[in-house]
Image (cartoon, grey):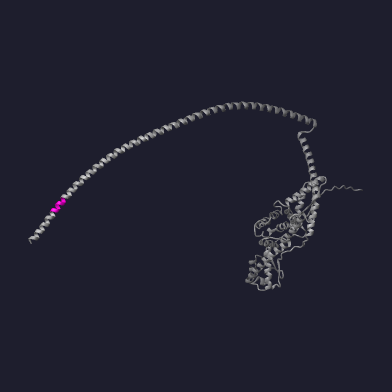
Amino acid sequence: MNSTVFSILLVIIGLIVGFVISLIINSMRGSIASKKADSMINNAKKEIEKLKRDAAIEQKEEAHKAKMDLDKEIREKKEELKESENRLLQREANIDKRDEMFQKREVALDERENKLSEKQEEIQNEKSKVEEIKREQLDLLEKISGFSKDKARELVMVKVKENMSKEISEYIKEAENEAKLKADKTARELIVTSMQRYAADIANDQTVTVVDLPNDEMKGRIIGREGRNIRTIEAITGVDLIIDDTPEAVVVSSFDPLRREIARVTLESLIKDGRIHPTRIEELYDKVCKDMKKQIIEYGNDTIIELGLTKFDPELIETIGKLHFRTSYGQNALQHSKEVAELSGLLAGELGENVALAKRAGLLHDIGKAIDHEVEGSHVDIGVDIAKKYHENEVVINAIASHHGDTSATSVISVIVAIADALSASRPGARNDSLENYINRLSQLEEIGNEIKGVEKTYAVQAGRELRVIVKPEEVDDLEAHKIAREVKENIEANLKYPGTIKITVVRETRAIEEAK
């Protein structure tokens, strides 16, 4: 028991002694830390003072350096300003010298101008004197001759005009006679020989537009129930069917001859087959289109073989075949092209030109007409584009472009094609023309002749291929008659479009009539 108490007391005493010792140690540590803190603060203050001193010294050094740089820059600026001032002074001196020079020159110019003014005045005075002398001489001449100046000028101009008019008429007449002597015989022989060697049929092929029916009952079958058959035919073929009171006939109407031909063949096939309904119509139409394409290619191939030509693109051959279904004034375009090709070859052979190239140009000269209803533009422009597309010879392209005179001919073959085209179009029976156009053309021909001074009456004869101009003999002499013929020719060429050629004949006749009683 006593030992236990003693142990507890020892523990308590140990705790108290430890607490006291820890207090002593802590106090000693605090005093040491405070001493260290004071030492650190003092060191920091000394360091700050040192930094302040260093900063002040450095600032003074920088300020001194900046001042030195500024002084140097000021000295350089002063030197530059001094140099600029010297240059300005030099320039001012030069300007003063130049100004003085200009003043001297101005004085010299003023003196020269004064001299020129004096000379001009002298010249004007001399000119006035000369004019006065001329007037006096003219007045003297007028008194001597008895004619005024205006009247004399008028007489001279009339005389010159008469002489020049006669000389021009004589020159034209001599030139025409000389040209006719050299060219007329040769040209006539060439054309006649070529036309004799190529003898084509005069009759034209007309596209058939009337379909014959076995009986009138077939009209009802073609129309169909509520008109469905006829509507189907018109819709897929693009034509109009005219079913009127004409017995056993149906008229096919369309602006496109190829469509009209396809519709005609389709309708005839339906009549032979007997089964007429929309489905069968479409089947036969497709079959006829395929057959027609083959037929077109066959037309093109036959034409090329007939003319003895080679190396044509297949698409171009098909385009040539399409000409079979085009007409111009009732003339079949393919037949016309073949005629032009044959005539061009014959004329080229007579003149020693390339016959094959002339035939090719003649065949293709109207190729644009095959598709001119599908493409915008004239058949000449379309034909030129087609020829360029298939890389035809430049001679062929120029022949196409120039055969109507739209472009100048650049080769003999182009001229030959134009001549052959006129021959094929103007031969009797080649083309049809309406009565109204025919009468208008004759009236216009006669009006052109009647408008010319000195013409008494004009008559269009031989279906408009000859124009006879009756002149007044008291107003027109023989030389003037040649001038009138030339003037009528030029007016017709400038104002009228016509197939073939027109002969102008000027008739001057003087009749002396007396009656014996």
Main SS of the magenta part reads helix
Q: Is residue 476 visible?
A: no
Q: Does residue 488 appear left or right of residue 229 in this picture?
A: right
- Count of residue discs: 0
User: Would you say residue 188 sits in the magenta stretch?
Assistant: no
Q: Position of residue 57 (x, y in %)?
A: 31, 36
- Location of residue 4 by image quarter: bottom left
Q: Position of residue 240 (x, y in %)?
A: 66, 65
Q: Position of residue 178 (x, y in %)?
A: 80, 47
User: Is 381 located above or below residue 129 in the figure?
Assistant: below
Stretch in magenta: 17-23
- Location of residue 434 by image quarter: bottom right
User: Is 355 located above or below residue 226 in the figure?
Assistant: above
User: Would you say residue 20 sits in the magenta stretch?
Assistant: yes
Residue under the point 73% across and 51% down: 495
Q: Position of residue 502 (x, y in %)?
A: 77, 53
**From the image, which quarter does the N terminus lie in?**
bottom left
Q: Nearer the viewer, residue 8 or 284?
A: 8
Q: Nearer the viewer, residue 122 or 41?
A: 41
Q: Is residue 119 visible?
A: yes
User: Is 179 located above or below residue 228 in the figure?
Assistant: above
Q: Nearer the viewer, residue 349 or 232?
A: 349
Q: Nearer the viewer, residue 411 or 154?
A: 411
